[in-house]
Image (cartoon, rainbow, N blue to C red):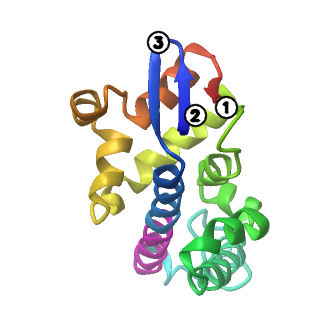
Amino acid sequence: MGVDFYCSNKLFNCSYGSWHNIRLDIIKSTFDYIKDKFEKDKELYGNIEDEDDENWIGEGSQYENYMNELNEFMEECLNQKNDVLLDCFVEFSPINALYYFDLGGLFSFCNQSDCDGFYSPGNSLDICILFDKIKPFTSKYNLLQDCIYNEEFNQINHNNNCVYSIFEESYKNRENVIIS
């Protein structure tokens, strides 16, 4: 038994356990991306004192407020064991903060049933944007990188498409990704 994702003529399937691990690794990769982004943004924009500057990230800015919210959330989630990390993420994720940093695809990706359901083309676009942002941070998760991005690996080893191509197909052709 496993989970199947279909869109047009594209298919990706894996066991429920593998899909759970993929989602955990996506969460962890996103957290790595967020930490890196905050460090780089502080270096680039941390000295800007003009509140009217579009790059101002100082005390009281929306950026700072959402950054603090995400940092607290990540700390709480990362203190959880893997078996409850996904539940913690779905239940307590700061949706506005994720969307502020253009990471709303993480919520869409994780907050979906493993069996019956679908991702809309809008969800799929958000997920592809997320995958584009976190790709460099997935390298420590070899299987994750292969099943998300490597079309050739999936077709040779599993007769599958990569996960990215399923979501890309969805938003480009405005078709739902069907989960069964």
Q: Residue furthest front?
A: 1
Q: Nearer the viewer, residue 46 or 40?
A: 40
Q: Position of residue 87 (x, y in %)?
A: 70, 67
| Residue at disc 3, secondary structure | loop
Dot 3 crowding, Cα within 10 Å, few <14, some 14–19, many 20+: few
Dot 1 crowding, Cα within 10 Å, few <14, some 14–19, many 20+: some
| Residue at disc 2, secondary structure | helix
CA distance separating discs 2 and 3: 18 Å
**Residue that label 3 marks:** 9
Q: Earlier in the sequence, mark 1 or mark 3?
A: 3
Q: Position of residue 55 (x, y in %)?
A: 56, 66
- Residue 64, relative to residue 131: is it above or below? below
Q: Nearer the viewer, residue 138 or 122?
A: 138
Q: Nearer the viewer, residue 157 or 169?
A: 157
**Residue that label 1 marks:** 122
Q: Residue at x 48, y 59 (%)?
A: 21
Type of the residue with mark 3: Asn
CA distance separating discs 1 and 3: 19 Å
- Residue 15, relative to residue 77: is it above or below? above
Type of the residue with mark 1: Gly
| Residue at disc 1, secondary structure | helix
Residue 162 lies left or right of residue 101; in this view the side is left
**Residue that label 2 marks:** 125
Residues drawn in magenta: 30-43
Type of the residue with mark 2: Leu
Q: How many marks?
A: 3
